[in-house]
Image (cartoon, rainbow, N blue to C red):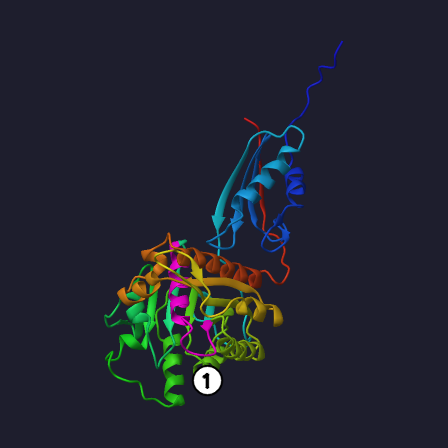
């Protein structure tokens, strides 16, 4: 006679948790449970419902991680259905100088810098901002290039900002909040200011602008390593710096100076972007390496910093900059827009890595409900 003793196939919370512990987050190479990315587990009899948190708005590993979660739970005796819900929570990296004062409501500040002009730094800043905004992040863009403000033209905004309770209200375009000296001055007027006045202006943009709640504030810096750069790293904690260069040696030499400046002031380097890596012919669609090849990657390897990727140049990039509609918005199907998406994903991942650099206890809410 066979054994007809009833078996209890109800899963325990500890079983679910133990099954998930070995799963590692691909970008950070640390456990999901260790990182606190499993934020809710509900066990109903043999069925499991859980929530997994992604730390960036451009997360490329959702399918891979979810498959690993389902596979792990399926190995448990008596496992039933598995429901996985995804959420996004962008954390503050907490990087930068400890004595600097954070901007109220701003989680992360990203400095976009270059050692010299003419490498397309503002184009990178603009497209990085709109790409993150399109992915669902709350993004601001500060044009700190006070002597050559180009953000108003590139974002297609020429209005004057309003005031609210003594604060400047940023303008907005393409889902991004904007502030620039270009909104306040006659566009044909040259800014002839000495260092102290420039420093005062930058401080005002940091302290007297009503940025609201932002996941990322992207700061388009002027070329070089002068007053604006030093003011920023002294006034606010910079989450990370992105160094923009082009492939030729003269640009790379200056990019290294900018990189070393940020290292000296203890600002994390998120990586190097090689802009204008090649020209895409509008007729044959071939990539022509008119400025050389591989310089950005070699520099990143030499100084042991991440290489964020190559961004080609197309005619639509110039058109978008002149028309006030960045290429990532106007031509999302283009190779350049795809490159900016890849760069934005790596930048966001770098910020997330800074946010979890120090080990922390997992935040897990475990619920057990009786089987119906």
Q: Which type of secondary structure does the marked residue at label 1 adopt?
A: loop
- Magenta residue span: 112-134
Residue 84 part of the magenta segment: no
Label 1 packing within 10 angstroms: few (<14), some (14-19), many (20+): few
Evaluate whether residue 213 shows in this view.
no
Considering every residue shown, the one lying at the far right of the view is: 1
Q: How many numbered marks does the figure carry?
A: 1
Evaluate whether residue 6 shows in this view.
yes
Residue 116 part of the magenta segment: yes
Q: Nearer the viewer, residue 327 or 364?
A: 327
Query: Residue 324's x, y, as percent?
Result: 28, 65
Q: Is residue 151 toward the left or the right of residue 217 in the image?
A: left
The quadrant where residue 280 appears = bottom left
Quadrant of the drawing holding the C terminus:
top right
Q: Mark 1 points at which residue?
A: 226
Our reading of the magenta stretch's main secondary structure is helix
């Amino acid at each position: 006679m066979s054994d007809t003793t009833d078996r209890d196939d109800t899963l325990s919370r500890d079983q679910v948790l133990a099954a998930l512990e070995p799963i590692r987050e691909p970008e950070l190479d640390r456990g999901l449970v260790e990182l606190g990315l499993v934020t809710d587990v509900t066990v109903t009899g043999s069925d499991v419902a859980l929530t997994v948190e992604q730390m960036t708005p451009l997360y490329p590993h959702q399918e891979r991680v979810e498959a690993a979660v389902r596979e792990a739970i399926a190995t448990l005796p008596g496992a039933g259905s598995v429901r996985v819900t995804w959420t996004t929570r962008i954390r503050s990296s907490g990087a930068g100088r400890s004595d600097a004062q954070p901007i109220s409501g701003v989680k992360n500040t990203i400095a976009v810098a270059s050692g010299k002009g003419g490498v397309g730094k503002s184009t990178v800043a603009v497209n990085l901002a709109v790409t993150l905004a399109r992915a669902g992040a709350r993004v601001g863009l500060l044009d700190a290039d006070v002597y050559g403000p180009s953000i108003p033209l590139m974002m297609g905004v020429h209005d004057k900002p309003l005031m609210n309770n003594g604060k400047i209200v940023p303008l907005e375009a393409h889902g991004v909040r904007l502030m620039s000296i270009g909104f306040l001055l006659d566009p044909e007027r040259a800014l002839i200011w000495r260092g102290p006045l420039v420093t005062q202006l930058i401080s005002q943009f940091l302290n007297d602008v009503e940025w609201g709640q932002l996941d990322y504030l992207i700061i388009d810096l002027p070329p070089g390593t002068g007053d604006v750069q030093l003011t920023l790293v002294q006034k606010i904690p910079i989450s990370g710096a992105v160094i923009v260069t082009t492939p030729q040696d003269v640009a790379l030499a200056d990019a290294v100076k900018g990189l070393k400046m940020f290292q000296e002031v203890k600002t994390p380097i998120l990586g190097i972007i090689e802009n204008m890596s090649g020209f895409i012919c509008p007729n044959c669609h071939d990539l022509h390496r008119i400025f050389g090849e591989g310089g950005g990657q070699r520099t990143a390897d030499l100084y042991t910093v991440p290489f964020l990727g190559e961004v080609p140049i197309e005619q639509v990039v110039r058109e978008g900059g002149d028309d006030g509609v960045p290429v990532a918005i106007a031509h999302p199907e283009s190779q350049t827009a795809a490159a900016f998406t890849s760069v934005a994903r790596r930048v966001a991942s770098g910020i997330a890595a800074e946010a979890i650099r120090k080990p922390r206890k997992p935040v897990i809410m475990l619920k057990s409900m009786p089987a119906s």
